[in-house]
Image (cartoon, helix red, strand yellow):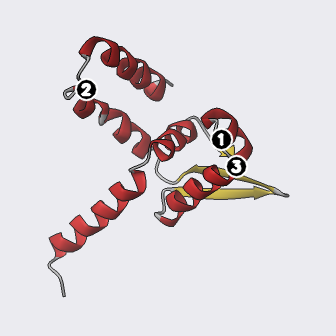
Amino acid sequence: MPHRSAIATSELARLLGALAHRHRIQIIEELRRGEQDVTSLTNTLAISTSRVSQHLRVLKAHHLLQERRDGRHVFYSLVEPDVATWLAQGLSFVEAELIDPHAIHEAIEHARLSWLED
């Protein structure tokens, strides 16, 4: 049986792998504001419905999302809303590696403010 820390690091790596796509991060940030359906996420992300559905499946398989059905509509929400805050805090690591610090810093600050508002 693997050492407990190996199991923990393996699970964390799987979680980070599920988050390792810009559209999945955007989905999490959108769901931080409250539950949404595929149509509203499609409009916000400006990608196809099938791509949004694929990303939702990945996030749901990693227990990051839950769904609520209302007739034929399915609404998605975060199981643990703090994951959105955790991602926003990750912007600090990105910010340190910037090539054009001023322009990208402004974009990161805008993202940080919009993601952490409320």
Nearest to the observer: residue 86 or residue 53: 53
SS type, badge 1: helix
Q: Which residue is mark 1?
A: 41
Residue at (25%, 29%) from the top-left corner? Answer: 92
Front-most of residues 50 and 78: 50
| Location of residue 87 in the rendering, given as x and y in whole percent from the top left corner | 37, 40
Give the position of the N terminus as an image quadrant.
Answer: bottom left
Residue most extreme to the front: 99
Residue 106 coordinates in the image, percent (x, y): 36, 14
Instruction: Report which residue position mark 2 lands on.
Output: 95
Residue located 51% across and 43% down the image: 23
x%, y% of residue 85?
39, 37
Between the residue at mark 2 and the residue at mark 3, the CA separation in whole angstroms equals 31 Å
Q: Which circle, 3 or 1, is nearer the viewer? A: 3
* Whole-percent x, y for residue 58 in the image: 51, 61
Between the C-alphas of marks 3 and 1, the distance is: 8 Å
The local crowd at label 1, few if under 14, some if 14 to 19, many if 20 or more residues have their Cα within 10 Å, is: many
Q: CA distance from mark 2 to mark 1?
A: 27 Å
- In terms of sequence position, does the residue under pointer 2 or pointer 1 come before the other? 1
Residue 41, picture quadrant: top right
Element type at mark 3: helix
Please state which amino acid type lies under the numbered disc 1. Leu
* Three-letter residue code for mark 2: Glu
Q: Which residue is mark 3?
A: 49
Q: Look at 48% across and 23% down and name the residue there.
A: 114
Q: Looking at the picture, does residue 107 appear above or below residue 29?
A: above
| Apparent side of residue 111 relative to residue 50 in the rendered image (left or right) | left
Amino acid at pointer 3:
Thr
The first of marks 2 and 3 along the sequence is: 3
